[in-house]
Amino acid sequence: MNPEVGFVGIGVLIVLLLLRVPVAMALIAVSFGGITALLGVTPAFGILSNTPYSFVASWTMSAVPMFLLMGFVAFHSGLTGGLFAAAKVVLRRLPGGLAVSSIFACSGFAAVSGSSLACAAAMGRIAIPEMVAAGYRPSIAAGSIAAGGTIGALIPPSILMIIYGVFAETSVTQVFIGGIGIGVVTAIGYCLVIIGISLVRPDLVPSRDTSPVSAEGRAAILQVIPITVLVLLIFGGMFSGLFTATEAGAVGALGTILLAAVTGRLTRWNITHSLIDTVTSTGALFIIGVGAAMFTRFLGISGLSHFLSSFVAGADLGYFKLMLIIVLIYLALGTFMEPFGAMLTTLPIFLPILRAEGISLVWFGVVVVKMLEIGMITPPVGMNVFVIKNVAGKYVSIAQVFAGVLPFIIMDLFVIALVIAVPSVVMFLPDLLK
């Protein structure tokens, strides 16, 4: 074992990432070079040839393409298009009712998507034009959707949580259940931000809608009943133990395809683009996962993982200091890395430390996904912000979107502080349903 080689490898990896080398290629190159330095070129080639199959052949990983297919079919066939209209009918009387409705619509879309980018794109196209037309300040309209999109990776099915569960060797279902708690708390926090802005700055948000519910409003509520029943079936079955998280992906994909067919929305174009999007997204995620698996092997062979966990134990940092360091690292990474890359480059370092400290890996999985999603709206590389600019560019500029998400980032930091101080916010449901 040679921890110095591990430290050099991490340094080289950071340099490559700053040079904008693709995350997967950087992980594989550093791991191959490090293993070659420690064991020789023949073992390095052996690990390089075996890791892709051993990673992809995991039964749990098959849930990733299934949940992606479920989300893409729902998106392309327009099954989720009525979520905003239905939420608007129910919540229109609240201060900032349209923006609050967009948060609830994002939460509903999250239950069939698992992707914050897809959530932001879908809701941005629908909600931002309507909010601007109703008199909302464009920055508030865009900021609420960009922030609301992050809920897409918190409420199951979350692709980030599936990947985390595989790497942490912990129950994906338990992480999913924990994600419900933080997803609900995040949604409530965002709604409070909007209501607070509307009360303090009524010039930014129009007056509430007090008109009676129209026939179109009642029809909008009826339109979302089928997708709501499907979501309840999937997660009711998963959380009751009727089927696993992996099997839930297959049930969800098949159910969404059948629902689209029954409602007459399953066209050849829809299914073709859903399959193409699923294959390309799965391939991109899996190649990063292969690189992360190799990096984990490299750090283990070098002895760096053991060295760091022993160092933290000897330093006696304590729970709060350790979590503060981890939070600051993820906030920094979120300014220039996408979530999957940030998570998979850090887990090989953090997981041994967390195990040594006795911190719940289910709880940490939920926290790390929340931290990664904050990075989706922080400058300069907040991916949700650029998605919103892409779908609603004629209404708002990049600077306006970043200004609009600032109050939501502050609320996100409060939520992180809450779940660190009171872990039961996340663990209440997982502990209850064990």
Image: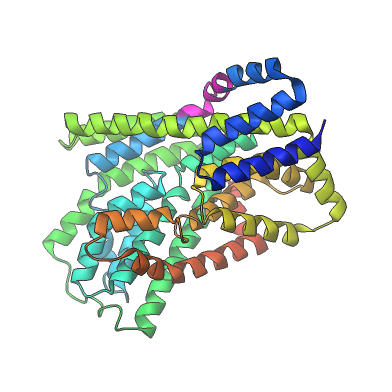
- As for residue 58 lying within the magenta part, the answer is yes
Q: Is residue 121 above or below residue 304?
A: below
Residue furthest to the left: 215
Whether residue 281 is visible: yes
Q: Nearer the viewer, residue 44 or 203?
A: 44
Residue at 33% across, 71% down: 140
Q: Nearer the viewer, residue 263 or 163?
A: 163
Residue furthest to the right: 314
Q: Is residue 337 left or right of residue 67?
A: right
Q: Is residue 271 above or below residue 71?
A: above
Q: Nearer the viewer, residue 320 or 281?
A: 281
Give the quarter of the figure containing the N terminus: top right
- As for residue 242 lying within the magenta part, the answer is no
The x and y percentages for residue 47 are 64, 20
Q: Is residue 260 left or right of residue 330?
A: left
Q: Is residue 142 above or below residue 31?
A: below
Q: Main secondary structure of the magenta part?
A: helix
Give the quarter of the figure containing the C terminus: top right
Residue at 38% across, 36% down: 68
Q: Is residue 13 left or right of residue 71?
A: right
| Total numbered labels | 0
Q: Is residue 337 above or below residue 405?
A: above
Residue 39 picture quarter: top right
Residue at 43% across, 72% down: 192
Q: Which residues are magenta?
A: 52-62
Q: Nearer the viewer, residue 94 or 377?
A: 377
Residue 289 picture quarter: top right
Give the colour scheme of this rendering.
rainbow
The x and y percentages for residue 306 are 80, 38
The x and y percentages for residue 138 are 28, 70
